[in-house]
Image (cartoon, helix red, strand yellow):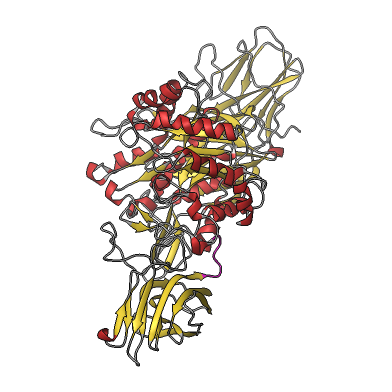
Amino acid sequence: MFKYLILIAFIVTLTFECRSFPNEVLIDMNQTEENAIKKEHLGIFFEYIYYKVNGKLGMSAQEIQDRGFDTELFGMDWEKHQYWFLYNTCSKDSIQEMKPWYYGFNKKGLRHYAVKKYAQNGNAGFEQAILLDSGKTFDFYVYVMGTVDSVYLELEDRQSNVIFYKNLGSFPKDWEWHKLSCKILPFKQHYNCKIRIYAKSRGELHLDESSLMATDNQYSLRKEFVDMIRELKPGLMRFPGGSFCDYFTWHFYEHIGDKNQRRAPNYWIYDSEIMRMDFGLDEYFHFCKDLDIEPYITTNFKSGSVPEALDLLEYCNGDTNTILGKLRAKNGNIEPMKVKFFEIGNEQWKRFSPDYPVRYLDYYYAMKQKDSSIKILINGFHWDGEKEINRIVSVVKDNEDYFSWHPGYASFPKDKLSEEDEYNTFAYGAIYTQEDINWMMKSLKKYNPNIKNAPTEYWTQFMDMDDWVTDTSQKGSTLLSGLGDINFLHTFIKNWETTGPTCRTIFLTFFFSDTAKDGRRVIYASPGYYALKMFFNSHGNDYVHSQIISSEKNYAKPEARVNFFSGASIFDVVATKSKDSLFVAILNRSKDASKDLFLNIPGFQYGSEVRIQQLYSNSFYDRNSSDEPLKIIPISTISRLDSIISLPKHSYTIISIPLNKINRKINTNDNKEIKIYPIPSTNFLTINSPNDIIEKIEIIDLIGNHVKSFNFVFEKKLNIDISQLSYGIYILKYYINNKPYFCKIIKTP
């Protein structure tokens, strides 16, 4: 018995228009683009943003801010922050605070701290506030110098209880730097506490380069953060910025090798904060190798130089016969990293660098001459439209491989969008993004027929620009933000032929770190992370063409301020194939109700078991938070899939179908002369074949049962009685010249 059911597009009849199911998608396995989806299409962007990488709530595993004792409250006029403060239990007039002090252990450090104690009794040193997680073991060290007898480490909670105390020991009074260290065993509870490093005896105490990190850290990052990246399975990672890469903050020479000899302090333009790069280029390389992520580097254009870019290229890709390749091997990465993608600067728009197109060419020619295999990205301000593309590409012509642009969906509080307008902005963003890609590629190809676009930073935002860095809007962790992420991802996948590296920023409305009500530090992810994780983990490299045959539409109301989506389908579908599975990813944009979707997959044996993952919540404003970090996560089930699937409102679904449940060797009814009508039908169905003899007819329901058969027909036209069939959808299978054809029919009351 033939067990495979085939659903095909409707046929227009002689006297009736064949009406489709209200919502239907056709997925044609015979229209497949092999190896279309690349690792670069599933990228992320690691940017150094204060309080996202560094600080108490950052992704760095370092618990001590300003671990090099470099900041000074009364130092340079652009310094605003100090983290270490004098700690003393003896009288203030019996000590001398000698900071800032120069010539520290870190030769690239600006300062270190020192205190001179004259009193016999009491303590003198420095302290700062930190957070400590329960259940973790910590390694501590500090470099010291001076004439005191011993150095002590102490942790004190908010109630002034000493929760840890350790005499780190003595050291030679030779005015050389010495490393003192200890291990701190796990606490049963988390603590918001103070760390103190001090002396009890008379004399001078100099402090430089300290560290307090959980032993489970990975690449100097918090384990929880790395685990989430590992589970996400991105294909590519852009590093290290962002605007960060174009200032004095990013000179790669200063952020490789020994972590205690890296530039400090590394002030960042946002709020003059320290961006200590303990996760530097060496750690990034280890990270990419271990997690099978393709590296992608942004060069320093604004305050860098062509020779520096060439050195960076050699450090990345040079073999150990080169000077910098040998240095990379010494720093722990023996084999060349084979970095393919290099971007020349970041967001070098006209108002920042009017000479960018001309200077860019110096980078391009030099880097391509050194390594012709690399791909180079140029960047521009796509928000200015074709004018900006003309400004840049008319100068550089075809001397680039990709045009980098940074799209985002935003709802600024000052705009006061209605709930519906805000919803439509994110849920239907793909329409707007597709328009951007269309005009962009048309403009770019005037100058370079081989160029591709590269959305190297995409994001969603619910805040005004002043809150950009803090990422504090609660809407950022909502399901609605995640719908925006999927609109982006689906659009880029559909445009795989003209799209290069695509990178989702992993901080803005993606990863969060905060304290729960009980004071615990919690690292958690937005629904957007889980949506992308669904696709990144459940996709194939082959792109399978899909077509929305019929769908309900959404239209903007007359008073709407957001109307770019009017008339768009409520469904967005992307299908891909691996060697053993078909993956059907479906975004249901319906705002108020669940919807049924007819999956028209020719050859699929309906009723087979498949894996279904769904991400949804009752309200699109429902969110993950530090107190409910897993409120909105995918639900995965193994279920039997019929032809019609019910999709929750504002949801994302991925169906994984085993290929052995799909018969790809089928014949659809492409003979336009054969008419089948009326569809829908109540009692009788007519089949009219003017030129060919119909040999046999079968009617099959949507779970594979043969409900009616007509053998030895041998007629060109006949009427079939279907009055006894139950209401619903069936497959009509008929044979001409011993060859089967298929058509969908509908039995109605």
Residue 395's place in the image compared with 646, above or below, is above
In this view, 741 is above or below 318: above
The one of 245 and 136 positioned closer to us in this rendering: 245
Q: Residue at x 53, y 63 (%)?
A: 223
Q: Nearer the viewer, residue 66 or 635?
A: 66
**487 relative to 612 in the view: left or right:** left
Magenta stretch, main secondary structure class: loop
The quadrant in which residue 421 appears is top left
Q: Which residue, as the protein is rendered here, is positioned at the far front?
A: 174
What residue is shown at x 44% (from left), y 38% (from top)? 487
Q: Is residue 21 left or right of residue 322?
A: left
- Work out which residue is located at the far top of the displayed protein and give it: 691
Please provide percent x and percent y for residue 271. 30, 55
Q: Is residue 686 magenta?
A: no
Residue at 48% from the left image edge and 82% from the top image edge:
173
Magenta segment boundaries in residue numbering: 214-219
Residue 647 in view here = no
- Where is residue 635? Give x, y as percent: 53, 53
Q: Quadrant of the N terminus?
A: top right
Residue 391 occupies which quadrant of the picture? top left
Q: Is residue 574 visible?
A: yes
- Left or right for 229, reference 301: right
User: Which residue is farthest bottom?
Assistant: 120
Query: Does residue 529 lie above or below 23 as drawn?
Result: below
The image shows residue 584 at horizontal and vertical percentages of 57, 38
Q: Position of residue 138 (x, y in %)?
A: 52, 74
